[in-house]
Image (cartoon, grey):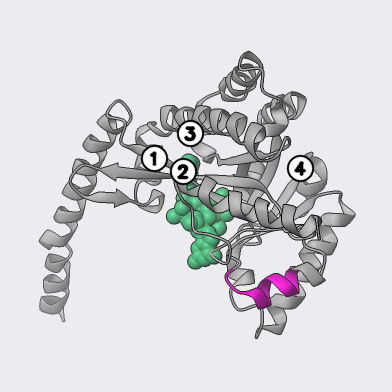
Amino acid sequence: AAKNAGRNRFSYFTPDLQVEAERRLRLTNDLRVALPGEQFQLCYQPIVDLATGQVCKAEALIRWLHPERGTISPLDFVSLAEDTGLIVPIGDWVFRQAVHQARQWRDQFHPSFQISVNMSPVQVRQDSLLCARWSDYLAREGMPGQSIAVEITEGLLLQAESKIDEKLLTFRRAGIGISIDDFGTGYSSLAYLKRFDIDYLKIDRSFVHNLSVDGDNQALCEAMVVLAHKLGLQVIAEGVETTEQRDFLKAVGCDFAQGFLYSTPVPPDEFELLVWPLLAERAADAQG
Ligand code: C2E
Ligand code: MG
Ligand code: MG
Ligand code: MG
C-alpha cells in the first residue's frame, strides 16, 4: 500500500500540472499586451422586450482575438485578468466602448437603448475609484447614466465589504442601471434585494434551460418573476433558446429575454444588420 501511495504521490507531479502552469503563465504574459495590442473585441447580444418584441437593450461580452490561438472566451481569461489586476484596465476599456456604442445605438435604434457591462467583484474591490470614474466619464461624454447598466453577481453584495453600499450609491446617483447577474446560482440571500436599490434581476440560464419539461424550473422561474416584481425589479431571462421557453416566460410576466433564440453575441456591425430588419418589420406591422 505504501508503495502504491508513493506512486500516486509521484503521479501528482506529472508534467500535466507543469504544462497547465506554463500555459497559464504564457497566457498571462500575452494578456499583458492584449490591451495595447488592440486584441479585444466587444460583442453584443440583444435583449428583447417580451411585451413588444423590441430590441431595447444589449449585453456587452468581451472576446480576446489572440494572434496565435484565435478567439479566447472570457471564461478562459477573465480569472487570469482578475489574478493579475489586469481586469481593471480591461474593464475600463469595456465600459468606454459600451458608452460610445450606446450613444450610436440611441441615435439609430431607440432613444432609451441601454447596454449592460459585466463587472467582476475584483474590479469593485481593488479599485476604490471605479464607480466615481465611470460616473464622471458618462457625465463628461454627455451621456445619461441610464444608457449603461452594470451586471454584478450576488456574491459581491454579500462580501463583508463595507464600502459596497457607498459604491453602488455612486452608480445609483449617476442613474446607471444595476443588474444582478446569474440570479439563483449564488447565495440567493433575498435580503440584499431589499437593501440595495437594484433595477434588474437576471434569471440564470440553468433555470431556463429545460423549462418546457421541468416543472420545478417552471415554478422557480415564475416565483422569481413574482418576487422581483413585488420588490419593484424587472426581470431578464438568460439563455432563452426556444420559442417554448420564450412563451412560458412571457406568460408568467417576465419582462425581457436574452439568448440564442434571438442571437448569439455578435460584433457591432452584425448587431446592426440583425436589429434593423427587426425594427423595419415592426414598423411594417404598425402600419398594418
Ligand atoms: P454572463 O454575464 O452570464 O453572460 C452570458 C453568457 O451566456 C455569455 O457567455 C453568452 O454568450 C452566453 N449565452 C447567451 N445566450 C445563451 C443561450 O441561449 N444559450 C447558452 N448556452 N449560452 C448563452 P460568454 O460571452 O462566453 O461570457 C461568459 C461570462 O464571462 C459572462 O457570463 C461573464 O460572467 C463573463 N464576461 C464576459 N464579458 C465580460 C467582461 O467584459 N467583463 C467581465 N468582468 N466579465 C465578462
Ligand atoms: Mg452578464
Ligand atoms: Mg449572466
Ligand atoms: Mg449566466
How crowded pointer 2 is (Cα within 10 Å; few <14, some 14-19, many 20+) is rated as: few
Residue 256 quadrant: bottom right
- Rounded to the nearest angstrom, the CA distance separating label 1 from label 3 is 9 Å
Q: Earlier in the sequence, mark 1 or mark 2?
A: 1
Bounds of the magenta span? 241-249
Disc on the earlier residue, 4 or 3: 3
Instruction: Using the image, tell me which numbered label, if any, was put on residue 94.
Output: 3
Q: Secondary structure at mark 3?
A: helix
The answer to which quarter of the image holds residue 19 is: bottom left
* Label 2 – label 4 distance at C-alpha: 31 Å
Residue 41, numbered circle = 1
Question: Tags 2 and 3 in contact by the CB under 8 Å rule?
Answer: no
Q: Where is the N terminus found, in terms of image quarters?
A: bottom left
Q: CA distance from mark 4 to mark 1?
A: 28 Å
Residue drawn at x 61%, y 67% is: 240
Q: Where residue 269 is drawn, which disc sits there?
A: 2
Residue annotated with mark 4? 198
Name, please, the residue furthest toward the right: 230
Residue at position x 15%, y 61% in the image: 16
